[in-house]
Image (cartoon, coloured by chain):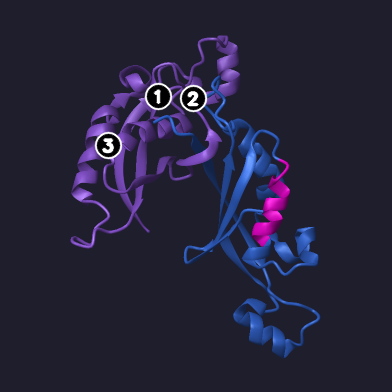
Chain colours: A purple, B blue
Amino acid sequence: MIRVTRKIEFSAAHFYDNPNFSEEENRRVFGKCANRHGHGHNYVLEVTVAGEPDPATGMVLDLKELKDILQREVGDRMDHRHLNFEVPELSGKIPTCENIAAVIWRLLEPKITRGNLDRVRLYESADLFADCTAESNGVRI
Amino acid sequence: MTASLKISLTRRYRFAASHRLHRPDFSEAENARIYGKCSNPYGHGHNYVLDVTVTGPVDPATGMIANLGELDPFVQHEVVEAFDYKYLNEEVPAFSKDVPTAENICREIYRRLKPFPAARLERVRVEETNKNSFEFEG
């Protein structure tokens, strides 16, 4: 089995707000991230697909195809967008690294037809990333 | 289609510290043979990079596995303040017994972070330089 990883970057705005929390509670739990004017990150997404290389091509999947899927499903949806307001898949969810990674997994999984989606790694900054993998006894979110 | 997903969160920290790889129960020749330059009696140092990975359910109220407002001060207190700008052999009690190799540093950091109450510690990864890294999962 071979793992193939492709990277895509996107820049987006967000803030953290739980409507069930008071203003004060939002500030206490989310700190600076609760600033209602929002702030932004240069997100780096690494998507890993695992599979056996096709003996005819030597490839697990066509990287150009994966590049197009990432652009369509993630880039077009999230690049230069405000994640709280412009990405329906995130509506009702706080756009943390964890939640965005899980949403990206759900978007990509049905589109990967060669090999299996193995891991979605989303960097919010060089010092923080979330990993999303399939696990039989994982948590349903 | 709604397969269960496992989410983990990894946060990077940094500390700079000196150490010496040397065992008093080895002869000088043995220390030199096993640890080479790392056995220099005056010690030497590294800019360590520490990746801490936690896992667990994502709290729907916060969207988080662990709030960095809790994880950062915990790691800061348990590891960074204890290791940063220190001579590990003499200033971190664990290394009066164990040689402060990156392997043992990984294990000691894991031991210190394991009690983090808000999420499950999954992995500790230490880069001693940008050419070598070490991971411990308990």
Cα separation, mark 3 vs mark 1, equals 26 Å
Q: Classify residue A63 as left or right of residue B21.
A: left
Q: In the rendered image of this protein, does residue B59 appear above or below residue B22?
A: above
Cα separation, mark 1 vs mark 2, equals 8 Å
Closest to the observer: B58 or B1? B1
Q: Which residue is mark 1?
A: A14
Q: In the rendered image of this protein, does residue A114 appear above or below residue A33?
A: below
Q: N-terminal of the two: label 1 or label 2?
A: 1
Asked which quadrant contains residue A27, the reply is top right
Residue displayed at 62% across by 64% down: B102
Q: Amino acid at mark 1?
A: His
User: How would you rate the neighbour count of disc 2 (Cα within 10 Å): few for under 14, some for 14-19, many for 20 or more?
Assistant: some
Q: Amino acid at mark 3?
A: Lys
Outermost residue, bottom direction?
B29
Segment colored magenta: B105-115
Q: Which residue is mark 3?
A: A111
